[in-house]
Image (cartoon, rainbow, N blue to C red):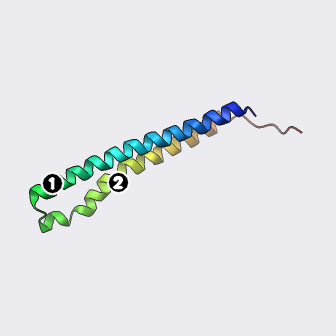
């Protein structure tokens, strides 16, 4: 097995995780700032406080969906392009 390919695959995986974490952090941070502005402007009324669970779902679902889709694509590409391993002694 070519170790250069294995190392490159590990570095690529690590880089993609960093990209996912950066995008997710920006997404969540943006929506938390928006929530703070909305809550300050609306002075945290009771009906708005009841919808915070829905807001949390909206904030957290896209990053998790992005991770799931990326993982599924990686798995699919590994299955499609994996070369059969031969047993060598």
State which quadrant residue 53 falls in.
bottom left
Q: Say which of 72 and 35 sits in front.
A: 35
Position in image of residue 4 (x %, y %): 68, 31
Taking 27 as reference, is 70 left or right? right
Q: Which residue is under mark 2?
A: 60
Residue 38 bears which disc, if any? 1
For label 2, the crowd category at 10 Å Cα-Cα, with few meaning under 14, some 14 to 19 and many 20 or more, is some
As measured in the structure, the alpha-carbon distance from the residue carrying label 1 to the one carrying label 2 is: 18 Å
Question: Which secondary structure lies at badge 1?
Answer: helix
Position in image of residue 28 (x %, y %): 32, 50
Q: Say which of 55 and 41 sits in front.
A: 41
Picture quarter with the C terminus: top right
Picture quarter with the N terminus: top right
| Residue at 18% across, 65% down | 49
| First in residue order: circle 1 vs circle 2 | 1
Q: Are marks 1 and 2 in contact (CB under 8 Å)?
A: no
Q: Say which of 77 and 7 sits in front.
A: 7
Is 35 above or below relative to 51? above
């Amino acid at each position: 097995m070519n170790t250069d390919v294995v190392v490159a695959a590990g570095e690529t995986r690590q880089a993609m995780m960093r990209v996912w974490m950066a995008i997710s952090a920006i997404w969540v941070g943006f929506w938390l700032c928006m929530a703070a502005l909305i809550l300050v402007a609306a002075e945290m009324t009771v009906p708005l406080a009841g919808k915070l669970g829905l807001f949390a779902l909206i904030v957290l679902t896209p990053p998790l969906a992005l991770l799931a889709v990326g993982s599924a694509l990686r798995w699919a590409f590994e299955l499609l392009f994996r070369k059969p391993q031969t047993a060598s002694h």
